[in-house]
Image (cartoon, rainbow, N blue to C red):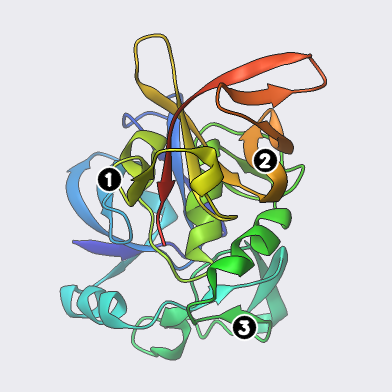
Amino acid sequence: MFGICNLAIIPLRSEPNDRSEIVSQILFGEHFEVTEELKQWSKVRMHYDGYEGWIDSKQFQTITESQYIQLSQDKIVLNSDLIEYITAPNNQLIPIPLGAALSFLKNSSINTTKLDFEGTTISEIKPKSNLINTAFMYLNAPYLWGGKTPFGIDCSGFTQMVYKLNGYRLLRDASQQATQGEALSFIEESEPGDLAFFDNEEGNIIHVGIIMENNYIIHASGKVRIDRLDHLGIYNAEVNRHTHKLRVIKKII
């Protein structure tokens, strides 16, 4: 079975239970394969990044395998404003967040409820220099474990969505993203838009942020914020200490 998210946001959980941890979110228009069904729950694998988890079976629209393949081949079209609205029949409105996928709206066999969108979209690859401008759209968004929107986002959801909105594909978790790209030896070699990764005492990658000019970094920690970056890690001037230990810098593009 295959499905597509026809709501603004649905939680992707680690277990088939409403009280289970939210590991990510599925935004409007994102499609996936259903790999397991259990009563009211469906285990899914996201097409975009292969991420897996459980969703409520009442919270998505089923599609055929051929429709799934077609969506997977179509150019990705994303909503480019902080929040927009999908118009449903009888002038009902469905709010959608920044980065919602809109490719399926032109496919009448999937868009059976005749949803319509008249807002601004993004569908092309943008230059690396645009990454920081996109990142600013999430500035001050509250930190939310598993979040992917300006109304709540985690560190790797932030980097993934910023890159996605510019036409570049990142995996979902910080530890997964750290396997991508080319490692740099020094901060001085980095450019705005490169990713900095940070580890814990056990050496596990637990955090990621986007490097800016002049040794600053924008990242999600408490909220999406801007801090100083040096060879030790992230220095938070508000608490007067380093909060994250630098592990590696990666040039993705």
Q: Is residue 193 left or right of residue 4?
A: right
* Above or below 242: residue 49: below
Q: Identify the element where label 1 is drawn.
A: strand
* Above or below 73: residue 128: above
Whether residue 26 is visible: yes
* Alpha carbon distance from label 3 to label 2: 40 Å
* Above or below 80: residue 19: above
Instruction: Give the crowd class for mark 2: few <14, some 14-19, many >=20 residues within 10 Å.
Output: some
Q: Position of residue 219 (x, y in %)?
A: 62, 39
Query: Looking at the image, which is closer to me, 44 or 237?
Result: 237
Whether residue 216 is visible: no
Q: Which mark is residue 179?
A: none
The quarter of the picture where residue 237 lies is top right
Q: Are marks 3 and 1 in contact (CB under 8 Å)?
A: no
* Alpha carbon distance from label 3 to label 1: 28 Å
Q: Amino acid at mark 2?
A: Asn
Q: Amino acid at mark 3?
A: Phe
Residue that protrudes farthest toward the top in the picture = 201
Q: Given this view, does label 3 or label 2 mark the residue nearer the observer?
A: 2
Residue where numbered disc 3 is placed: 117
Name the image quarter holding the C terminus: bottom left
Q: Which mark is residue 215?
A: 2
Q: Residue at x 30, y 63 (%)?
A: 3
Instruction: Give the crowd class for mark 1: few <14, some 14-19, many >=20 residues within 10 Å.
Output: many
Q: Given this view, does label 2 or label 1 mark the residue nearer the observer?
A: 2
Q: Position of residue 68 (x, y in %)?
A: 24, 73
Q: Identify the element where label 2 is drawn.
A: helix
Residue where numbered disc 1 is placed: 42
